[in-house]
Image (spheres, rainbow, N blue to C red):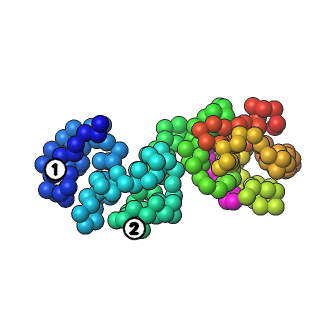
Amino acid sequence: MKAKEPAYYKLPITKWPKTERPREKLIKFGPFKLSDAELIAIILRTGIGPSSALDLSRELLSKANGLLHLSKMDYNEILALKVKGIGQTKAVTIAAAMQLSCRIESETGNSPDQIIHSSRQVAEIYGPKLRYLKKEMFLVILLATNNKILGDSVISEGILNASVVSPREVFRVALLHMAAGIILVHNHPSGNLEPSQEDIMLTKQVVASGKTMNIPVLDHIIIAGKDYTSFSDKGLI
């Protein structure tokens, strides 16, 4: 049986007891005492008409089927939920907050002067950035002689094939940054971990070009959901 909500829930949040207002609760007790809906209400800041920010956040979570699904949504998908009171500004704010959470997760595995020793390290750094994207994104990670990450560059967005991802562009970026080696990374929005024939053919082309340029391709990582596939680990490079 559902617990009866306090009568003040029907009032604007500013009329609630101070100890029950999301912002004040967070200040006094810390974020762990707040529900998902209360935390989102703080991000939303205001409601609309008789609906408080907490009402909006509850409806948002309900229509999104929970926080995890909401975290995967982009701006357009949040707007498409059609929560009255969540327009462009609030949708942008929510999408930005969700993206920050992904980037924070990525940063936990990406300390300054990160030196790559394994495919898992690459997946820990780039997985949070790529796993929930709705389209394929192809990146090249640029490495120094000791496998320290110098940076990365997006080569292509959209359908991945040899006509879109040019080895010339990959190594143009590598030469520009004086990289001693590179790692290729792209995502499979479908969640399929297996490399496609296009993935394999493209990798062979880039590896062959790397040998000519004396810039080795150390690995090609496919991010699929929370898992990954390494061409090097599978003996494909």
| Residue 195: x %, y % from top left | 77, 42
Left or right: 62, with 4 as reference point: right
Question: Label 1 vs label 2: CA separation?
Answer: 28 Å
User: How many callouts does the rendering have?
Assistant: 2
Q: Nearer the viewer, residue 134 or 83?
A: 83
Q: Can you see residue 36?
A: yes
**What number is the disc on residue 7?**
1
Query: Residue at coordinates 61% horizontally, 55% vertically from top-left?
Result: 134
Q: Nearer the viewer, residue 169 or 136?
A: 136
Q: Nearer the viewer, residue 108 or 13?
A: 13
Query: Residue at coordinates 33% horizontally, 48% vertically from top-left?
Result: 37
Q: Determine the secondary structure under disc 2.
A: loop
Which of the two labelled residues, at mark 1 and mark 2, occupies the earlier sequence position? 1
Mark 2: which amino acid?
Gly
Q: Which residue is mark 2?
A: 87
Residue 119 vs 11, above or below: the answer is: above
